[in-house]
Amino acid sequence: MSQVKSIKCTNCAAPLSLIGGGRVESITCSYCKSVLDLNDNYKVLSNFKNVKESQKLPFAIGMVGRIKDIDYTIIGRVTYAAREYPHGEWTDFLLFSPLYGYAYLTYEDGHLIYSKRNRTFPNVTWSELTQHSSIGVDRKDFTPFDHYEAKIVYIEGELTWLAKRNDKTYFVDLINPPFGISAEKTNSEIEYYKSEYLDSTTVYDAFNIEAEDEAKTFNVLKPFKRPFLKSLSYIAFFVLFIIALFALVGNVDGSGKLIKSISADNQAVKSTDFTVNSSKYLVDLELRASKAKELNNFNLQIHKDKNIIFSLTPQSAYIFNSKTNHIEKKLHPWDKDSKKVRVSLNLEELGTYHLSIKPINPSIKSTLFIRINEASSRLNYLGWFFAFTFILWILYKFYQWRYKRKLAYERGIDIENEDLEHNTKSGIITIVLIIIAIAIIIAFGN
Amino acid sequence: MLYQNDNLTYNCPQCGDKLNIFFKYSKLIKCQSCSSAIFLEDKSVRLIGEGSTLSPEPSLIELHKMFKLQNKTFTALGKIRYGYGRGFWEEWFLRDEKNQEFWLSIDEGDFVLEEKNKLSLPFKDFSKFKVGSRHGKYIVTEKGEGTCIGFEGELPENINIDEKHQYIHLSEGGGHLVTLEFTKNSSQTFKGKWIDPLDIEVLN
């Protein structure tokens, strides 16, 4: 209710005003700091007169401000200290709106969090809360982050429950930054509050008070600013992949152009010239016979300006240095059972080449068909592309893993945490995959 | 447009003024001229006492005004106020565009939209329900009681001013709940959902 009721402190007789609606159960006298029970004839529950405040707070009871388009009045505050974090205190300011009821504005080391009672939390028992990897509330998954016990160290103003000094509350925090769920258990009940990290400047403006410096410390609900490169990588990687794939498959013609088609037989040596007009990709020699025995009955050589540059026999294949005439590289011979062989050569110089085909055993009746294509690409060009893409993906995953690890470290997750162990395994797997990828690249290169 | 019962015309037995009735199944109405509480019988009206005047309090919902919620348009036809010590809660009697009845409970910013339900109860003793206890898929999350202070508008049932009214919330999880309501002589079951007041769009 919005009406003001006047009462007197039963300890010091100072006038007190109730502004916080019908759910208010206790009020602290602003003069003698006695906490009075409104349900029991204003009986004194505890006293905070000799308690020194360790926090300097920007908000005070009676202040009015607008949060989430709701006009609130600060009607009370509770300061907690967690047993596990002895140096960390936080203060919950109780807000009241006659239309929208109660909410909390939590101040912790400069961070501001707005919370409102949540009624849509699933029916989960207290002990089950921390056992779930995540809990869905209002179409969002919240991850259990921390559980701790806290005690009340200071109270002021009106509260909707009976609170005394050193009263204990158990908390389980679930997070999905900037949102969170705080499960709070006292001796009498369990309540759930849905929280949201607020921009402090906006809140200070809303309450028309001087803004504090931005909080420098870490807060679990404060959303991390996504690194620019990370954001870019999400889109850029896939866009680049698709563009590159289209460029390779669609715009670059690697199907080859027939520049010579001849046949040779066991009767005589066959010689012919062919002219290479394109330096793009490779020159393909396709050798074909009706039987493997016939294919194996020929030697083949290619000369450029009377210098041998390539020699092919059923047992061996050599690439020569055209200037020194020395063997530059030995290639694997073809399979003896093949009836068709394809040789791809990187003929860097344009111009006329001389091809000679010599039968090995003239008595074996054999015919060889030769087709020469220029500007022909090979499938392993795509293989390279995919290998390159794979490495980029691995690097991206590695970067993502490092980012998560950094996040986990900064948020104070125990290094023994199972999730982190899982992440560590993922990291090792990632590194192994990188090594495999490098090995594949080297193998391809050879 | 608000429904108006044109077939039957009722006049206030206290002041004689015409009673504007917006729901044909209404049983109780407050005269808008003299605030008398009038019980509507088949074809007659019966004065059951002087109605108390409720103090005006800020509220999102206003009598005879429409609002949208969950893709439905509701009209507030009446409300009952229950007091509990220093505070109160209100039960708003609503009608949607299909003329179905709903109840909207508003208690200091907590909103529950419910419909009457015929759920069978394991027992009908208020004291046997303990907060935190489980009954099938339901968990008892709240128990409370209040006293009927008064009403406004029109209601589909008679009420007794100053009568004690007990309620129990049984949570089904995910915001769904069943509310059991007990008076001295009756009990009722409602089923519905907690709603976010920010989802209410008041229509002019």
Image: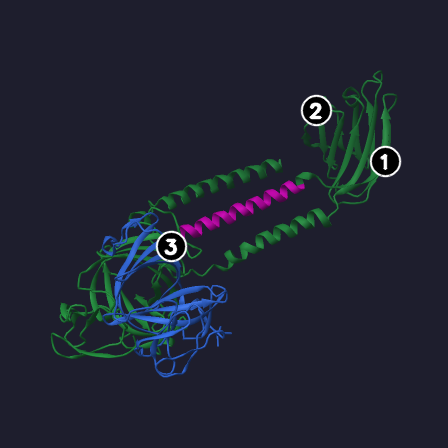
- x then y, percent, for residue B46: 35, 74
- x then y, percent, for residue B186: 29, 60
Labels 3, 1: front one:
3
Residue type of the residue flagged with mark 3: Lys
Residue, x 34% and y 64% (percent of image)?
A115
Q: Which chain is green?
A: A
- Is residue A13 or residue B109 the one in the foreground? B109
User: Which residues, given as a range, are shown in magenta?
Assistant: A381-407
- x then y, percent, for residue A63: 30, 77
Q: Which mark is residue A273?
A: 1
Identify the residue under disc 3.
B118
Identify the residue under disc 2.
A335
Mark 2 surroundings within 10 Å by alpha-carbon count, few (fewer than 14), some (14 through 19), many (20 or more)? few
Relative placement, left or right, of A372 versus B48 is right
Q: Are marks 3 and 1 on the same chain?
A: no
The question of residue A394 being in magenta is answered with: yes
Residue type of the residue flagged with mark 1: Asp
The chain under label 1 reads A
Residue, x 78% and y 34% (percent of image)?
A285
